[in-house]
Amino acid sequence: MRKIDFKFALPNLITIVGLCLGLNSLKLAFEGSFESALIFIVIASIIDSLDGRIARLLKGTSKFGAELDSLTDFVNFGVCPSIILYFWILNNFGFYGWIVSMVFIVCCCLRLARFNLDIDEKKEINWKVNFFKGVPSPAGAGLILLPMIFSFSSFKSIYQINAEIILIIVIFVSLLMISKIPTYSIKKVKMSKNGFILLVLGTVLFFSFLFKNTFETLTIFGVCYLVSIPVSFIHYSNLNKKYEK
């Protein structure tokens, strides 16, 4: 019997755990436990950020792992958030709410298919690896769930989100995912020792607030990411102009 290599098995096992969390978020949404469903999606997104890094650390990257990760992303950040949002509020719009849910899922699928093709392409310009083409699927999931997260935070007393606006947000984010608008990627960012220390401190601080004020922290984080989109576009454009010169 062929032995399974630990360095390949562990990252894939972590990915599968993330997939199970995503599927359980659907079950919780069906039962009306929307806050718990959101928590499961958040944990799944954290796991998604770890499995690839662990695979590279162990030198256990594989084509199988990449495909498994992509399929898991489609379920966790395409299907699950859209269906959760549908049962939370989009079902009030009947047929149109369902169409909008499907639009997001299809756009997520297209975005991941394009991303998989881009991985195999050799980039000539080094600085471009610090940018994604369009909004990545985990961020897209976070953005469409942002109104829901906001509604569970203490910020809801400041502003009541109109249901029709949520429809527009889902369509807008769907288009952002399949667009070629450059957005920041930290996957291959190189940093100094001091920069790494600041990153660790920032991560500890973020998770401290996340445990204490979960939905408030996620709301602020989501808004910050939203603001970063035009910033990344301007940054990319300036770098591109310098390169062309």
Image (tube, rainbow, N blue to C red):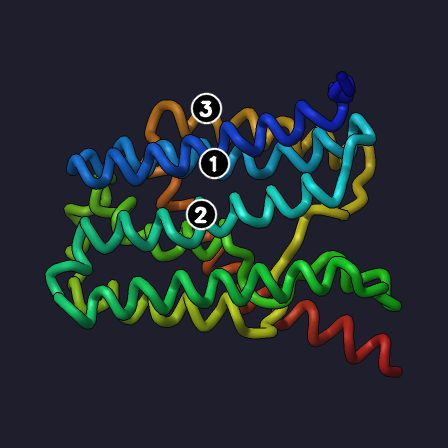
The residue under label 3 is 208
Mark 1 Cα-neighbour bin, 10 Å: few <14, some 14–19, many ≥20: many
Mark 2 Cα-neighbour bin, 10 Å: few <14, some 14–19, many ≥20: some
| Mark 3 vs 2: CB contact within 8 A | no
**38 relative position to 189: left or right:** left
Which x, y percent locates residue 184? 63, 57
The residue under label 1 is 19
71 or 205: nearer the viewer: 71
> How many numbered marks have been drawn onto this rendered protein structure?
3
The residue under label 2 is 75
**Residue plotted at (82% across, 31% down):** 59
- Mark 3–mark 2 Cα distance, whole angstroms, equals 28 Å
Helix, strand or loop status at disc 3: helix
- Mark 3–mark 1 Cα distance, whole angstroms, equals 25 Å
- For the residue marked with disc 2, what is the amino acid? Val
**Residue plotted at (47% across, 36% down):** 19
| Mark 2 vs 1: CB contact within 8 A | yes
Give the mark nearest the N terminus, 3 or 1.
1
Helix, strand or loop status at disc 1: helix
Q: Work out whether 20 lies above or below 105.
A: above
- Mark 2–mark 1 Cα distance, whole angstroms, equals 7 Å
Give the mark nearest the N terminus, 2 or 1.
1
- For the residue marked with disc 1, what is the amino acid? Leu
- For the residue marked with disc 3, what is the amino acid? Ser
